[in-house]
Image (cartoon, rainbow, N blue to C red):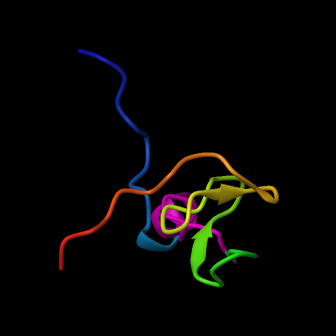
Amino acid sequence: MGALPKQRVSPARQGKRRSHHHLDLPKLVECQQCKRPRLSHHACPHCGWYRNRQVFTPKAQNR
């Protein structure tokens, strides 16, 4: 036989252990060029700007 717990883990203790297992929402900031939300430390997917320079040209989106 392998190792077995000596006592049952209560729901409160189990919940305290799992309290940090949640997902975090992405941190969004406002783009300085187009004022749309973008991920922090990433180039804007809408206009292609990052740190006051254009790093790529975005593709035209078909809508």
Number of callouts = 0
User: Which quarter of the rendered picture does the N terminus lie within?
Assistant: top left
Q: In which quarter of the image is residue 51?
A: bottom right
Q: Does the magenta stretch include residue 21?
A: yes
**For residue 47, what is the image quadrant?**
bottom right
Please indicate whether residue 51 sits to the left or right of residue 14 in the image.
right
Q: Residue furthest top?
A: 1
Q: Looking at this view, name the residue that lies furthest to the left.
A: 63
Q: Looking at the figure, which quarter contains the C terminus? A: bottom left
Q: Position of residue 29 (x, y in %)?
A: 69, 75
In the visual, does 46 lie left or right of 30?
left
Please check the rendered image and state whether residue 28 is part of the magenta-colored stretch, yes or no: yes
Q: Is residue 26 left or right of residue 29?
A: left
Q: Closest to the observer: 5 or 18?
A: 18
Toward the bottom, the furthest residue is 35
How far across and down, in percent of the image, does residue 20 sit?
Answer: 57, 61
Q: Give the residue at x 49% y 58%.
A: 21
9 relative to 62, above or below: above
> What residue sits 35% from the left and 57% below the top?
59
Residue 36 on image: x %, y % = 58, 82
Nearer to me, 34 or 41: 34
Q: Residue at x 55, y 47 (%)?
A: 56
Extent of the magenta region = 13-29
**Residue 29 vs residue 2: left or right?**
right
Q: Residue 58 placed where, x, y %?
A: 44, 57
Q: In which quarter of the image is residue 48?
A: bottom right
Q: Please report the residue visible at 44 percent of the width from the left and 66 percent of the height from the top.
A: 10
- Tell which of 40 and 52 is nearer to you: 52
